[in-house]
Amino acid sequence: MSARFLIEVPHDGTMAACVGAVEIFLKTGSHFLTHADWGCKDGVHKAWIMVDVDSRDEAKAIVPPLFRQHATIVQLNAFSIDEVENMRRHLTG
């Protein structure tokens, strides 16, 4: 069963680093990478990618090798009100 992951990939804040990172992502041909969202124009030099894959390792493998070491992979989840109420009961129980 797949899980949802947020991949955050930082790069240096220079124009050359931005251009280089975007070029690498776009030239890989990977659907995930060509649809990354970037924060560069707002001074946040990172790319973000949301993926549904089977594991954290599979998510990390999507990142170009040059950027893997500094990438952050976060498994995402949602909560229902019932889950929150159950968690609250465990806090006070």
Image: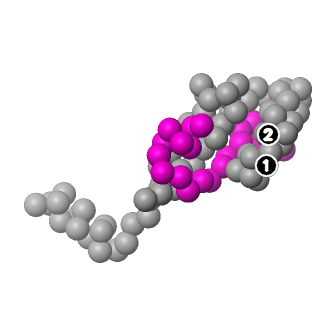
Res 73 visible: no
Determine which of the numbered discs, if any, sits on residue 28 in the image.
Answer: 2
Name the residue type under label 2. Answer: Thr
* Within-10-Å neighbours for mark 1: few <14, some 14–19, many 20+: some
Residue beneath label 1, please?
34
Q: Residue at x 56, y 43 (%)?
A: 59
Q: Residue at x 24, y 62 (%)?
A: 87
Name the residue type under label 1. Answer: Thr
Q: Residue at x 57, y 49 (%)?
A: 6
Residue lying farthest left? 93
Quarter in which the N terminus is drawn: bottom left
Q: Is residue 33 magenta?
A: no
Does label 2 or label 1 sit earlier along the sequence? 2
Q: Residues in magenta?
A: 37-61
Q: Are marks 2 and 1 in contact (CB under 8 Å)?
A: yes
Q: Nearer the viewer, residue 14 or 92?
A: 14
Q: Which label sits in the foreground, 2 or 1?
A: 2
